[in-house]
Amino acid sequence: MACSVISFAPTCLALAAFVGIAASGVVAVSAQAQTLDILTVDRLVEHTSTVPAIKGESVSLFVRERIASTMLEQPAGAAFERKVVLMVHGGFSPATIAFDVQYRDYSWMEQLAREGFDVFTMDMTGYGRSTRPPQMNDPCNVMAEQQKALSPKFLPAPCAPNYPFELVNSDSESDDINAVVDFLRKLRGVDKISLVGWSGGGIRTGSFIGRHPQKVDRYVIWASSNYSRKNPDEPPALPATGAPTTFQTRAVGTDLRWIGTQKTPGMIEPGMPDLIAALNQLADPLGSTWGPGGLRAPTRTYWGWNAIGAKKVQIPTLIMVGEHDALTRSNLELFEDLGATEKVFLGVAGGTHFMNWEKQRRVLHEASIDWLKNGSFNGATTGTFRADENGVIARK
């Protein structure tokens, strides 16, 4: 069951967010791609939650689609084989900000749609326009260390969580993805779809593939978080003890984690941090009123994303990581441990963990298009590559 809204217009953006963004050229696309009408279709997919705090309750999972109008006119079935892609976001910014910033050529979704893909992204439970469990509405349920950002003006004194457990887990998040994947398979009449996962979306999609390998065709990981060969195989008693909400301010998410890690001049366009920060605030109207404002996200209990779990991923897989990303080492280990015989690793010079909002976004776009369309990168199905600061590819 789902409801949908179709739009030809880009998402409305806060005008103030554009202040300071300089004009520049766009990525080259074919004449045919330039003339395509790319539609935006927003849906809510109903799902029976397996999150312990709301288990058995009906929730709504927000799903956005970007698709060429000519493709949408095609009947379900063969026309959509190897063309349906689901993109899964990471730990804080929801789906549309992660993959569909509709400014110039920043939308990864739109670039894929212009190349003939039917592209979807989803908000996991607790994010964006998907259902947020009510436990996330109580500032006392924010992790203790992060409550300091809310004190003393918003939160007079630290307080213990009223729900003293972590909120979501590997099973519940795989179930979220499975609900959307099954919806898309039925919608487009296909047996398999392809997956793209960024950061926390890497462990989410990887864990999903371990449970449902028969539903996935090709796979793109961009800087998976939470991978370790020594991660536990089995879950603890659920729900795990803790607090249900993690909270990220601009000072942490934009200034420290993003700008603070960019070491190559010219990679971040002036004004982009302001745009992303503004969109993040719009994505969480309640969180924007907490202290200095920020994004809420559910805390997560993970297991299984380890050497054993990686061996279960046997479908063709492309891994991409920016060279300024602290996750490079763990993603190289993940690459080595994958069970796939067709696998490529791409290191990207000058890129951070937030490359989707930087100059090197074009490498992400073009590499993923190559892999999803051809099952290869730069003509190869295996190997390790590097993109330099200008996007020039060389085998390592």
Image (spheres, rainbow, N blue to C red):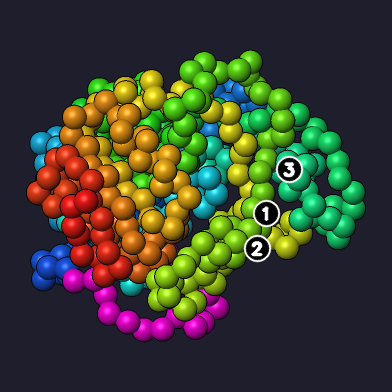
Above or below 44: residue 395 = below
- Please identify the quarter of the rendering in which residue 181 is found: top left
Q: Residue 381: where, in percent of width, then height?
A: 14, 40
Name the residue rendered at 52%, 52% in the picture.
Answer: 93
- Please identify the quarter of the rendering in which residue 204 is found: top left
Image disc number at residue 251: 2
Evaluate whether residue 85 shows in this view. no
Q: Main secondary structure of the magenta part?
A: loop
Amino acid type at image mark 3: Val
Amino acid type at image mark 2: Ala
344 or 65, nearer to the observer: 344
Q: Are marks 2 and 3 in contact (CB under 8 Å)?
A: no
Give the residue furthest to the front.
396
Name the residue rendered at 36%, 84% in the picture.
Answer: 23
Q: Would you name the residue on which mark 1 appears?
A: 287
Q: Secondary structure at mark 2?
A: helix
Q: Would you name the residue on which mark 3 appears?
A: 142
**What's the CA distance linking mark 1 and mark 3?**
11 Å
For the magenta stretch, what is the residue range? 8-28
Q: Residue 199: where, in percent of width, then height?
A: 45, 45
Using residue 367 as the reference point, say whether residue 122 is left or right of it: right
